[in-house]
Image (cartoon, rainbow, N blue to C red):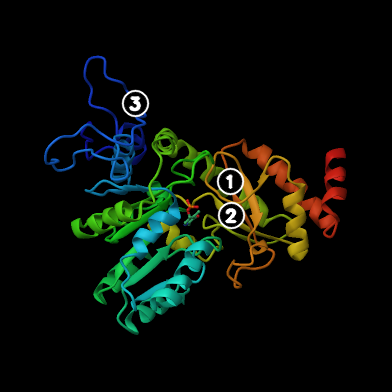
Amino acid sequence: MSHEPADQAPSTLAVTAGRPVRTQGSPVNPPLVLSSTYVSTGVPGPGELLYARAGTETWQPFEEALAALEGSTRPGLVFGSGMAAIAAAFSLIPVGGRLVMPRHSYQVTLAFAHELAERSGVDVVLVDIDDTPAVLAAVAAAPTSMLWVESPTNPMLEVADLPALIAGAHAEGALVAVDNTFATPLGQQPLSMGADLVVHSVTKYLAGHSDVVLGAALADDAELHGRLLAHRTLHGAIAGPFEVWLALRGLRTLALRVERSQATAAELARRLAEHPDVLEVRHPSLPSDPGHERAARLMNGFGSIIGVRPRGGSDAADTVTRAVRLWAPATSLGGVESTLERRRRFATESLTVPEDLLRLSVGIEDVEDVWRDLDQALRAAHAAPAASAEALADEVAGA
Ligand SMILES: *Cc1c(COP(=O)(O)O)cnc(C)c1O
């Protein structure tokens, strides 16, 4: 693979990293190789490809590109899903260890932590991740194996003071792991700030087209990297080559997608804050948002997830999800298409997330088109908060 100049901007690295070495007639893109095994005789050399559970030449370019973007000296490790990458990170917590994590972590990560508590006696302590003194007090209260950070959080969009948390947790001997899915490496590079581990749901922004489920974990430290790699190979939660090839293809346009969706999200947040049918808007771009000052100081951009509470409670919120036509009412996020959902429809979502909170993932469509659709859906919800799905669909279709 080509060597990447360290002085390239992240948006350039997204395009240049993980390319084949240039020789006459060589492909510009890494090939998709479908082979479970590799020709090999004798004692395998270090890094030699042997068997596709341990590594493939289709993973390597993606893993290199991820490392370049996250500022890691070691390749990233691709996994079959974000949760598989999180499982590898959680495997670093010993039986009977202690895990401090955000109250508003991704709900499946929370469920996983609760399983660790039951199965492995891990003491799981939930904190408000934007309250730095409270987080550090929780870490210091007893020997802590790992501080888990999501920032901004899913779906509440709290912003953590990453450098302060990393320094404070390290002073107490805790590992710091950051789920960087929401911010993307273009928004923040936790390893460069001193974090020990970074994980991603590649499913979201990195792949970016809602057509693959993939994850990744990165560690700069040789021992941690080795343990994550060993976990992947032993547990076998690996990615298929085709999904990884698609993810690298998606990664090439990461900067353009993130730039566009962030700009649209900030404009939508500004308009939503003035909308008569909206009770509350959460987006770190808004000067009134609790996370604004910190995000402006620590992050590059404010992200493209918005929290909205329409007037009329959870009925109105449900009505919005049925009244939209351009926005896809669907879970997940970070795709080119705008999606939205009411998070508390899931019984497992944290009870401190408001019942009526809609999570919006802003895509790359024209800002006026996404605004018009959202505006008509909010008005429809206000006019008929308790309307049945069918009646409303008819009404909207005829409008
Ligand atoms: C989606 C998501 C995950 C889980 O990733 P999968 O690829 O769905 O397994 C983890 N963390 C965050 C913040 C997510 O949004």
Task: Give the residue type at disc 3.
Answer: Asn
Pointer 1: residues within 10 angstroms few (<14), some, or many (20+)? many
Disc on the earlier residue, 3 or 1: 3
Among the 4 quarters of the image, the one containing residue 171 = bottom left
Residue at the limit of the structure toward the bottom, as seen here: 141
- Disc assigned to residue 29: 3
Q: Nearer the viewer, mark 2 or mark 3?
A: 3
Residue 82 is left or right of residue 61, and the answer is right
Instruction: Check if mark 3's residue and mark 1's residue have beta carbons within 8 Å.
Output: no
Residue under the point 59% across and 66% down: 349
Circles 2, 3 touching at the beta carbon (< 8 Å):
no
Distance from disc 1 to disc 2, alpha carbons, whole Å, reads 8 Å
Q: Horizontal and vertical percent for residue 344?
A: 65, 64
Amino acid type assigned to the residue bearing label 1 in the image: Val
**Camera-side residue of 365 and 174:** 174
Looking at the image, residue 384 sits to the left or right of residue 130; the answer is: right
Q: Is residue 395 visible?
A: yes
- Which quarter shows the C terminus? top right
Q: CA distance from mark 3 to mark 1?
A: 29 Å
Q: Evaluate whether residue 300 shows in this view.
A: no
Q: Nearer the viewer, mark 3 or mark 1?
A: 3
Q: Name the residue beneath numbered marker 2.
A: 306
Precedes in sequence: disc 2 or disc 3? 3
Helix, strand or loop at label 3? It is loop
Give the numbered dot on residue 362. 1
Residue farthest to the front, as pictured: 41
User: How packed is label 3: few (under 14 Cα within 10 Å), some, or many (20 or more)?
Assistant: some
Q: Are marks 1 and 2 in contact (CB under 8 Å)?
A: yes
**What element does badge 1 sit on?**
loop
